[in-house]
Image (cartoon, rainbow, N blue to C red):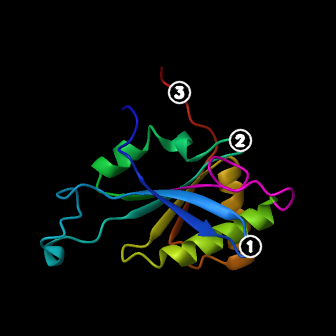
C-alpha cells in the first residue's frame, strides 16, 4: 500500500510535563466525510492506533491508507519513550502509559462517531491498563492485535 499521506502532527503535554507526539489523518471528502452535506453522511469513524514496545506511530503506516480509504479518521500517538515523544528518565510503565492515553482521549474530545482503539502488543496492554485505571471513558471499542503477519 505504501506510506500514508502526510499527517497533521500534534504535541500534547502529559500531566507530568512530558511532551507526547501524535499524528492525525482525515479521510478525503467523499469517503464518508463529505463536509458539504453533513446531514447526508454520518461522521467518519475515528480509529486510535497504539503501537507496541520499541515501535512508533510508523508501525501503522501500511494500515493508515486502508483506513482512510474506508472513510476513517486516524489518530496514532508515539507512546512516551518512543518515536517523537519525550523520553523521561523514569515513569514509563503501563500505568503511566494508560494515564497518557487518558490525557490524549480527553484532548481529542468525544468524536461524534465514537472512538475505536486498536492496540498491538504493548499497545494492547496499555488499553487493558487504561480500562482498569480509567474505565472505558472516551473509548467506545477496543481491538487487541497480538501479531501482524507480513505477507511479503
Q: Quadrant of residue 55?
A: top right
Residue 88 image position (x, y, % from top left): 80, 58
Residue 138 in view, yes or no:
no
66 or 93: nearer the viewer: 93
Q: Which residue is mark 2?
A: 54
Contact between labelled residues 2 and 1, with CB atoms less than 8 Å apart: no
Q: Is residue 86 magenta?
A: yes
Residue 12 image position (x, y, % from top left): 59, 68
Q: Which mark is residue 4?
A: none
Task: Answer with left or right where residue 103 lies relative to residue 8.
Answer: right
Disc 3 and disc 2: Cα gap in Å? Answer: 18 Å
**Category of crowding for the residue at label 3, using alpha-carbon neighbours closer than 10 angstroms: few (below 14), some (14–19), many (at least 20):** few
Instruction: Specify the principal SS of the magenta part.
Output: loop
Q: Which mark is residue 150?
A: 3
Work out which residue is located at the far top of the displayed protein and give it.
152
* Mark with earlier residue (1, 2): 2
The stretch in magenta equals 75-91
Disc 3 and disc 1: Cα gap in Å? Answer: 32 Å
Q: Which residue is mark 1?
A: 132
Compared to residue 33, the image places residue 16 above or below, namely below
Disc 1 and disc 2: Cα gap in Å? Answer: 23 Å
Residue 43 image position (x, y, % from top left): 29, 71
Q: Residue at x 17, y 57 (%)?
A: 30
Q: Residue at x 57, y 36 (%)?
A: 148
* Mark with earlier residue (3, 2): 2
Residue 53 in view, yes or no:
yes
Compared to residue 19, the image places residue 42 above or below, namely below
Amino acid at each position: 500500500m505504501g506510506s500514508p499521506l502526510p499527517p497533521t502532527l500534534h504535541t500534547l503535554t502529559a500531566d507530568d510535563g512530558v511532551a507526547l507526539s501524535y499524528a492525525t489523518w482525515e479521510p478525503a471528502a467523499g469517503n464518508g466525510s463529505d463536509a458539504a452535506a453533513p446531514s447526508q453522511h454520518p461522521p467518519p469513524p475515528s480509529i486510535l492506533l497504539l503501537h507496541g514496545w520499541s515501535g512508533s506511530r510508523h508501525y501503522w503506516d501500511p494500515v493508515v491508507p486502508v483506513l482512510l480509504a474506508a472513510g476513517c479518521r486516524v489518530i496514532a500517538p508515539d507512546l512516551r519513550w518512543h518515536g517523537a515523544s519525550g523520553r523521561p528518565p523514569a515513569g514509563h510503565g503501563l500505568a503511566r502509559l494508560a494515564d497518557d492515553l487518558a490525557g490524549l482521549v480527553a484532548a481529542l474530545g468525544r468524536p461524534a462517531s465514537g472512538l475505536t482503539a486498536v492496540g498491538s502488543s504493548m499497545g494492547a496492554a496499555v488499553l487493558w491498563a487504561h480500562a482498569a485505571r480509567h474505565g472505558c471513558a472516551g473509548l467506545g471499542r477496543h481491538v487487541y492485535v497480538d501479531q501482524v503477519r507480513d505477507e511479503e
